[in-house]
Amino acid sequence: MEIKIIGKSIPNIPWQNKPEGYPFPVWRYSENPITQWNPVGRASRIFNSAVIPKDGKFVGVFRADNRAILPQIHFGTSEDGIHWDINPDYIHWKDENGDEFVSAYGYDPRLVEIEGTYYITWCTDFGGGPTIAVAKTNDFKEYTRLDNAFLVPNRNGVLFPRRIGGKFYMLSRPSDYGHTPFGDIYISESPDMIYWGRHRKVMSNKAYGWWQDMKIGAGPIPIETNLGWLTFYHGVCNTCNGYVYSMGVAILDKNEPWKVLYRASDYVLTPEMPYEVSGMVPNVCFPCAALADADTGRIAIYYGAADTYTALAFTTVDEVCRFAIENSKLAPKDDETVK
Ligand code: BMA
């Protein structure tokens, strides 16, 4: 069966062919990383960040940690998705009454266009703990921040790119207030992006292999395919030298996305390169966005490396879905739902 992306054409998607003889399904951009230390203004590092195509170019929302190590979300534009012009000032949000909303910190943003509106989710402070903030914009000039989606503590809120059965859906990872040593991926439903409910568990960290046995969290916006929702996520293991963040892949049911159809036993990316194993936080590959070209099946994944750099990796829908199918080992509780 032909495996296809259901979505937009992105003829100028960043791309490099797979190196000759490379045996694995996801390969890195040879010019990585695409952002460096002290990239703009007071930003010392730009890493876990999100990108979408817009008007033949690319726009993004970037996690920038400033020189006091305080993260905020910055807007940026690019002609080619690789070289970025990132605003030195962070995004100033307004609430629905038009009053300024100051997010005490902001990190790990995701960006998606749904029905002609752009939605940003990120991790914000909510009364002393982290949760998922939601904002919308039509022009990347004025941003309206909606109410937080969930109670504290929660992280890694990732919207689906369209309604399913008339409802919006968001993945998230309930957590603790610190460097959470546990965590599974859940899904919540909303009629209006304000009220979230019907929570279901999607995937647990209790799967095959140790690379994801401490916690997992959703990554890029899921990619619609004729098989289901292609979903990249991060998996973390704890070693005697600290946490190690790798990237995994699963395919979720198209109409009931809390059901896992396939989940690869092996990671598809793990810290190996100098810019992944060395930096502010060594041994981190943290994906937050993926571009997917419906015409060619090409996929470009943006990931944070060592909490210091932004990096790119490539795959195709056919190769990565076949990898997930052929190496699938579902955990007993993967498809646990609220009865
Ligand atoms: C997570 C988040 C990410 C970060 C990762 C590794 O808890 O804070 O922003 O990349 O830890 O430090």
Image: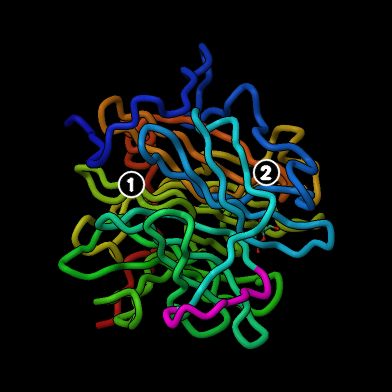
Report the magenta residues as a range: 96-105
N-terminal of the pair, mark 2 or mark 1, is 1
Q: Camera-side residue: 81 or 236?
A: 81
**Where's the C terminus, which quadrant?**
bottom left
Determine which quarter of the picture holds residue 309: top right
Residue ID for mark 2:
305
Indicate the position of residue 249 as horizontal and vertical percent values: 43, 47
Give residue 223's mark.
Answer: 1
Q: Is residue 300 magenta?
A: no
Determine which quarter of the picture holds residue 124: bottom right
> Residue at position x 25%, y 27% from top?
295
Crowding at dot 1, Cα within 10 Å, few <14 / some 14-19 / many 20+, comes out as many
Indicate the position of residue 83 as horizontal and vertical percent values: 59, 31
Task: Give above or below for 3 relative to 168.
Answer: above
Indicate the position of residue 314 as horizontal and vertical percent values: 48, 30
Q: Is residue 108 left or right of residue 332?
A: right
